Image (cartoon, rainbow, N blue to C red):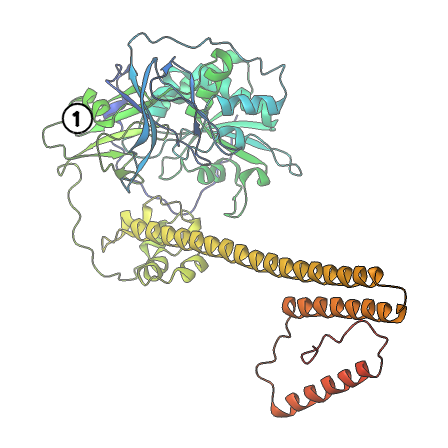
Amino acid sequence: MAFSLFKFKGGVKPPTHKAQSASLPIALAPLPSRLIVPLHQSIGGMPRPVVAVGDKVLKGQLIGEADGWISSAVHAPTSGTVVAVAPHVQPHPSGLDALCVVIEPDGAERWIERQPFDHAAASPDEVRRYLQRSGVVGLGGAVFPTHGKTTPAKNVPMGELVINGAECEPYMTCDDVLMRERADDVVRGAGIFRDLMQPQKVLIGIEDNKPQAAAALRAAVAAAGENFAVIEVPTRYPAGGAKQLIRVLTGKEVPAAKRSTDMGVQCFNVATAQTAWRAIAHGEPVLSRLVTLTGNVREARNYEVLLGTPMDEALALAGPLPDTDGIIMGGPMMGFLVPDGRAPVVKATNCLIAHSPRLFPPKPPEMPCIRCGACAEVCPHELQPFELYWFARAKNFGKTQEYALFDCIECGCCAYVCPSRIPLVDYFRFAKSEIWAREREKNAADEAKARYEFKQLRDEREKSEKAERLAKAAASQVSRKATEASGEAPADAEKAAKTAAIQAAMERARAQREAAQPKNTESLTPEQQQATAEIEARRAAAYLAAPESTTPPIGENAP
């Protein structure tokens, strides 16, 4: 069946460097000496640790419980002993620590009791909760909790479900070999997502430089009796971006302020579909992932690596050459140099590239922007990167937001073509982090202000209540004394009670004045002040002319 494909604006065609690692089958990485498992491995809340130092754990046992709906559980990748629950360096450009569960393997690989989950007999919400408990997240790099993406929009029918096998980043081939060797699991996982979202079509998009993967998926679709379309799309970076692939396959453009389900379409990575099927059919939570080990190595290859494996131990399997001076996590376009080789493999680790000056020569010094516009021509989101650069450099973060800074997906196309060798993405990341930091500070200040204002209101209320209690107590005391007095002077007792009532009313008036002082009286003109004084004088005179009144005036000159 022929399909009409669409184009997305911009994009580049960097050298792919994929042949080195795609020629060999998947290999299983050996058990490392220690597993350092970060609890926060997805977008969303930080999972809560449910194990302590000294606990014995089984392979697949829950060690981090999801914190809220947009969060995902974390499990022990192997059996062993928990030796620490403490901060450890994480794979992040900042090099900051994150809370991790450190497990010393016992080598037995003893599993928890595994049972398949009958998703056909379960409700959609039960399936989503099961995927959350199994730790299934987007393995294309975004690591968004998968269960949170499987809810269709209420008012928009699902038109297309897109399974993303494009894998456009250079050097990376983990999805390619996954589709070649485990195509059946990918198709069955796509069927689970289909059952949850009920789309009209299921489209599997693969770049046309992966003919073997496309053939394997077509055979798997036919064997499963599914009506899925396997579509080869032109090879162009970043065609593997979710919005770009949706645009190519469906013609729909997803605005930055909307979820794709609001447009009747959703996108999942092929590895995500495969892990979802393993969780449903075999009761296996996400404990490992395929990682491409490539770059400055003797034998590039794809390995199935346990989560928590130190990156330097994982990369050692490919034989780094002597001039290797670092590790890039991800591809050369969107990846980053890992600050510490002891950082562990996580669910977002799809590729580790051995860095060397030979493969990645130092960039020439940054030169001034010449406003050639090349960055704008290749931006897949039709932004103006040179304008964003100027405002980010000037720390005019308000202007960067006006120019849609947060629409930038940091694909690196702009920096790739920049003749001045400006690291544009670094400037954009800096601007985003500053805006986020200021937003957090503003929210903290707003919360502190709200707490202060609430405290003031509470203090004023307590003062008013105290004054009223004192006035009532005084009136009660006077009344009691009057009652206890002899009946020779009832008029005096009645007068005393009336005086007490007036005093109580005056106390209430004072409390009201303290709680609600007149506003905007500091800048009155002399004429306004004189008029105010005359009004208060008339009010006082009127009060004195009505001695039976028990409610004093509530004005500035009231007693």
Residue 309: image quadrant is top left
Which image quarter holds the C terminus? bottom right
Picture layout, residue 263 above or below residue 216: below
Residue 135: image quadrant is top left
Which residue appears at 58% of the width and 16% of the height?
119
Residue 548: image quadrant is bottom right
Nearer to me, 525 or 102: 525
Which residue type does callout 1 highlight? Answer: Val
Q: Residue furthest left?
A: 322
Residue 455 drawn at (x, y percent) = 56, 56
Residue 208 drawn at (x, y percent) = 38, 29
Residue 163 drawn at (x, y percent) = 48, 28
Count up the numbered dots.
Answer: 1
Tell whether 233 sits left or right of 157.
left
Which residue appears at 80% of the width and 80% of the height?
543
Picture layout, residue 407 above or below residue 78: below
Q: Which residue matches tag 1?
A: 297
- Is residue 229 visible in this depiction of the protein? no
Disc 1 is placed on an element classified as loop
Q: Residues within 10 Å of mark 1 (few under 14, many from 20)?
A: many
